[in-house]
Structures are given as structure tokens and as C-alpha cells.
Amino acid sequence: MSAAPARHPWWQRGVFYEVYPRSFLDSNGDGVGDLPGLASKLDYLVDLGVDAVWLAPIFPSPMADFGYDVADHCGVDPVFGTMADLDALLAAAHAKGLHVIVDYVPNHTSDRHPWFLESRASRSSPKRDWYVWRDPAPGGGPPTNWLSHFGGPAWTLDARTGQYYYHAFLSAQPDLNWRNPEVRRAMLDVLRFWLDRGVDGFRVDVIWHLVKDDAFRDNPANPDYAPGQGRHRELLPVYTTDRPEVHDVIATMRRVVDEYDDRVLIGEIYLPVERVVTYYGAKEGSGVHLPFNFQLLETPWDARAIDRRIRAYERLLPAYGWSTWVLGNHDTRRIASRVGRPQARVAAMLLLTLRGTPTVYYGDEIGMLDVPIPPDRVRDPLERNLPGLGLGRDPERTPMQWGASPNAGFTAGTPWLPVAEDFRTTNVAVQRDDPRSLLTLYRRLIELRRAEPALAVGRYEPIDAAGDLLAYVREGEGRRFLVVLNLGPRPATFDLAARHLAGRVRMTTQLDREGERPGDGLDLGADEGVVLELT
Ligand code: NOJ
């Protein structure tokens, strides 16, 4: 076993794991996951082999958007525990070699945040300009046509002061004004607060939203709008997102993070990949380290389409840009529901053999499915505001399935969201010792990635394939691996001889053919993926 070269920092070599803290493990029976619960499961993460844990927000919050409405950026919400619990978690994780990333929510705060309370108190408040306030349009009504992601106009009238404030999401999430230098200072201090406490980095919420047009121009109509997507898609968000000035703001964040050793900034960006790559910054060290690449969430599960996306992404990356891939998160349908459980194994092999830092969403490693939520148990404000469009995110946020005991071992109380019906058969306990389980496959793939620098940090070379087959080579330190994935439900053969390739099977998604030496053709079963060590 050779170690990955030291010149690659941990956040390039390692595998990230997203925990949605409300749903991981509840230690006190209130039905909501918490920090002590997570701390008690660190060994599970170590066994799985991940290097870093990203925690979705744990800060004091009225929970209108489950923590993405922050009322105090430098605290811990009592539902998750205390600051002492957080410190203990950091210490325990670090002692086990795990890095901890926290969420950073700079675009907006809760409407209960003391800054906003002060801002809305009067037009002459010293913090008035900390948020985006505008007079009504000349004839009355909202100042621009800007729409909220969570339904309706993105402007809410504050009757007492007669002005509207802007909110890209809920009216309970007013947007901060990043053009104001005091806001910048205060929010950069938030970074320092957590860096001083020892966190290893941040996942920055909606980073492409931070700056809005200073001329407050109306957004143009979206010619491709199709009903059923949420009304905000009627407009193209050209004046509300991805403004050129956002890169100056990000550069200031990067400077703060770089005052500390070996930390990482990850940006959440839902944009076409040509735009995503601009978030590495115009020059090295001026952007985020990792702008999340969500193409596997957005691309149809089709070998040719995915192949094109991987190649295009690799071509577009700046020389100093490190790639990254994501298969699931708390805002998107679960991978096993999107592609089916047999393909979820292929998806795992894809995620963990591509070049770039992978992020695994909690529960995907055991094949958790989206859980249907009865109307009376809906919690997500997106589903409440825009019911029936399939936009709700509760289904992918349900409790982690630890075992076959009541509530899957997640809580001794009533879980805040329903537990999946299949928890007795889909859970960590049954999969842990099953040599063919999805959990074992994840563990083995991560182990292989750790053992082979070619897979962790090596070069990527596309290989032409046809039909449902997707193929590429990873190469580094004198070793080469061919990955061939069958994204379809029919067996297929990949012609090795025609490509002058030969080798030995190192791993398959069924974990059953190790050591096999295919001849001229590599036969793949339905929904099978193979890693071949080339000789
Ligand atoms: C992105 C987060 O991932 C999502 O969960 C949240 O609702 C929005 N940002 C608003 O903060």
C-alpha cells in the first residue's frame, strides 16, 4: 500500500461525508438528531473510511428553513446541544483523524437575527444598510420583479417603515447587503470565530447569490420556462445571482481562510459548469478551493450524457482548480431513488473512482430511499409553500437507519420526520457484516481509493465507449486503472483488445470477481461496474 503523495492536501485526497445533523442520531429522545449523537457515531465514519464530515447548520435558528435561517452565527442551537458539545465533537473527530467542516450561511440571516431586528427598527437605524431595503415601485408594489426560490415575490413590505426588504428564499431569511463594508467585516469575523475554534473549513451556502445588481434591474423572462418547476424559474436570475462583484467578496473570504493552515472553502453553486469553474477565482488562491460540481445531480443517468459532462468539466477546469463530485445532498432526491438500487452501486463506483474530491450524503452508503411524507408530516417550507410540485426536500432528510430496533435506532422519542418503512432490512447493522452489501462496497471503494494514489489524485483519461457503457482510465505513480461502468439493465461487453488494454479485475460492484483476468473482452453484467488494474 502506498500513501497518497503529500503534495496533495487532505481535501484533495480525501472523501467528504455530509451529515444532516437533525437526522443522524438523537441522543436525548427529543426526536431530533444532535451533536452528542453524531459524536457517538464517529467510529462508524472512521470505519467507512471518510476523511471529512460536513455538518449542515447547527447554529441558533428559529428553524424556518431548518438552520439556514441563522439567528446567531457564533453559537449552537440548543436542539443540537451546546458549544461544549461542539468543542468535544471537534476534539474527538480530530483525535480520530477526521476533519470537520461547518456550514457558513453568508447570504441571509433569520429575520430574528439581532442585526435584522435593528435594521428593520427604523429607516435611520445604523444597521439599515446591512440588508437590502428599497422603496416601493413608483406605482406601489415591489421594487423589482425578483422572485423568491420559495415562492412569490422576493420582496416583503415592512409596513412600519414603508420599505421592502429582499429575500432570495423565505421572507424569514432577509438577504444581507454584502456591498456594505461593515457587513463584510462582521461576516468575515464569523469565519475567524470558527477557524479559531478549530474547524477545518466551510461549506458556503448559496455563494453565487451574495451580490445583487446595484441598479436593481428587472430579471428577464426565461424563454425555456415550463410550468411545474416553481414560479421563480419564470425569470432568468441574471441580476440577482452570479454578479461579477461576487468574486471580490469571495476573495476576501479566501484571504481569511488562508490566514490559517490547511483549511478549505467549499462553495455551493448551482450554475452551468462554465460558470461554476469561475468560482475557483480568476487567479490561483482568489476563489474557493472547491466549487461544488453538481452535474451528477442534474444529468440524466445516461452513459453518453455523463461521459460528455465529465470530459467537458475536465477541459474547463483551470490549471489550479481541483475537481469535485457530488452524488447527493439535503436538497436533492436520493441517488437510490433516482437511479434504483442496482444502479446505486454503479453510482458509488463512479463517484469514488472519478478524479476529484467526492462528497457522500449520509445514508446513501446504505441505499436509503426518499421517504414519502404524508401531508400532515411535511416540514420543509418549500413543500409547504409550493405543494404538490415534487420540490419538497423532507423525503431525502429522513432519519439515518442504524438498525432494526424501533425508529431504526435513530431516536427513543418520536422522529421529527418519518423513518423509512424498509428500515428493518435497509440499515447499517444488517449491512455492516454482509460482504456483498452496498455499505461494504462503499467501504471497499474508499479503501481502494486510499490505497491507490492513481485513483485518489491521479490523472483522468476519457475512453470512448458505446451504449450504456462509461469508461475512463485513472493513472498515477506508474499505475493505471480502467473503470468500466454499465449504466444499463442489460449485460454488455467492453472490447479490451481493440483498445490494446489488458489487466486484472481489482474490484467489481458485486464484489465477486477480484483477480479475474478478462481476455479480449470485458463482460459486464446488468448494472455492473468494474475496476481493472491495467498491466
Ligand atoms: C441552500 C441550502 O442547501 C438549502 O437547504 C437552503 O434552503 C437554501 N440554501 C437557503 O439557505
Image (cartoon, helix red, strand yellow):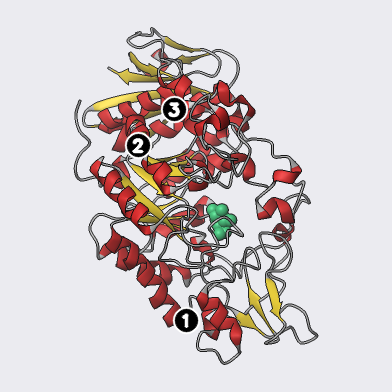
Residue toward you, 495 or 387: 387
| Residue position marked by numbered label 1 in the rendering | 180
| Residue position marked by numbered label 2 in the rendering | 50
Point out residue 174 in the picture as x, y percentages from the top left corner.
59, 71
Q: Identify residue type, mark 1.
A: Asn
Query: Would residue 238 be seen by someone viewing this image from the given angle?
Result: yes
- Disc 1 from disc 3: Cα separation: 45 Å
Q: Is mark 2 within 8 Å of ligand 1?
A: no
- Disc 3 from disc 2: Cα separation: 15 Å
Residue toward you, 127 or 245: 127
Residue toward you, 239 or 77: 77
Point out residue 30 in the picture as x, y percentages from the top left corner.
54, 46
Task: Residue at 48% x, 75% y: name it.
Answer: 178
Q: Secondary structure at mark 1?
A: loop
Between marks 3 and 2 in the image, the one whose residue lies nearer the viewer: 2
Whether pointer 2 and pointer 1 mark residues with C-beta atoms closer than 8 Å, the reply is no
| Residue position marked by numbered label 3 in the rendering | 349
Q: Identify residue type, mark 3.
A: Met
Q: Quadrant of ligand 1?
A: bottom right
Query: Would residue 265 be seen by someone viewing this image from the given angle?
Result: no
